[in-house]
Amino acid sequence: MKKMISETQNQALYSILKAYERINSLMIHTPLAPSNILGQEKNGEIYLKLENLQRTGSFKARGAYNKLATLTPEEKQRGVIACSAGNHAQGVALAASLLNINARIFMPKGAPKTKISATESYGAKVELVGDTFDETKTATLAEVKRSGEVFVSPFDDCAVMAGQGTIGIELLQDLPEVDNVIVPIGGGGLIAGIALALKTYRPEVKIIGVQSYHVHGMISSIWQQKLIANRSFKTLADGCDVALAGELTYEILKERIDETVLVEEEEIEEAIHYLALKEKVIAEGAGALSTAAILSGHIDHLLKGKKTIAIVSGGNIDFSVFKEII
């Protein structure tokens, strides 16, 4: 459990670079698109990292493939099981199909239909269990003990975080002088991987984490300096609907996250609407969190005169939800 925590920064970077070697030919080096509209409005340079254009429609395929690729032959034979609100499910399903591994995915009963059908299209078996992600996770861990399958955590795993950290490598390649990176937070795997990659090469870069007021376990934990759960209502950012963040991710982020932002549900809707109409980018709720933070005005003081990247982490939004917002 303490493996990633005890690694030095350089060792963590080595894990991310090895992950980059594994997935580079299989995953998309997603575009870093300048937003002239936001840049002019905020008096700085703002770029959108379009992980909604990644395979499966989100960044999750990176970490899932890296994890499954590092399994032993015996572990691959046992098959894998994962729990997910949707995007990790698709990532694991894709990785399992590429590596010829049997996969079962537990998803919350309210998971978006688009994410369920997409997961099944890659050949994984989907089971709907629990009303929230945390209930689904509890059921999954109980099933692991019974079945012997290998559990693939959506965030609290060294190999998964290293895979997500490959985004940080791409950011450094495309904009080495970046000042700020704004990242959505669910369980913390994405922002932890990016922070480990970026702060090794560029310690002065500011890592800004964003969550919904409705669900902000990680940000609450950072504020309280201990791991705690925080979920009051369902959020439009369903991909980040994680009440209790990971132990590994919390330990990494409590020393590396520089700023935190909470956004209202209306601000998430506004960001989805803005991205679609002004930037021609389709983002799901979680994918729009970073843009919501920018539009909210809460971090204007960090953006002025700086080069800022907002991670658009995914685009798997239900059409009915998208239609209602637009």
Image (cartoon, grey):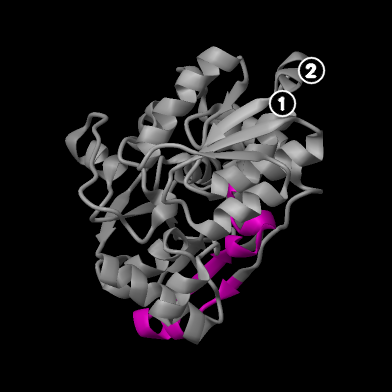
Residue 178 at x, y = what percent?
51, 61
The quarter in which the C terminus is drawn is bottom left
Is residue 139 magenta-colored? no
Q: Is residue 48 magenta?
A: yes
Secondary structure found at label 2 = helix
Q: Nearer the viewer, residue 208 or 319?
A: 319
Image spot of residue 170 (x, y percent): 65, 54
Q: Residue at x 51, y 79 (%)?
A: 35
Q: Residues within 10 Å of mark 2 (few under 14, many from 20)?
A: few
* Tag 1: amino acid: Thr
**Residue 37 in sight here:** yes
Amino acid, disc 2? Pro
Is label 1 in a helix, a strand or a loop? loop
Give the residue number, with chain letter if any, for mark 2.
73
298 in relation to 152, above or below:
below
Find residue 225 and report its horizontal and vertical position in percent.
21, 32
Q: Image check: 87 left or right of 326?
A: right
- Which quarter of the picture shows residue 55? bottom right
Measured in 3D between alpha carbons, the distance from the residue under mark 2 to the one under mark 1, in whole angstroms, is: 9 Å
Q: Residue at x 64, y 45 (%)?
A: 91
- Image vertical order of residue 64 relative to residue 278, above or below: above
Graded by Cα atoms within 10 Å as few (under 14), some (14 to 19) or many (20 or more), the crowding at tag 1 reads: few
**Which of the labelled discs sits on residue 70, or is there none?**
1
Q: Which mark is residue 288?
A: none
Residue drawn where x is 23% and y is 29% of the image: 226
Instruction: Give the magenta part as a residue range.
Output: 33-60
- Tell me: 206 left or right of 155: left
Task: Point out the residue furthest to the left here.
Answer: 224
| Residue in the image at 35% along x and 44% along y | 257
- Nearest the viewer among 165 and 74 is 74
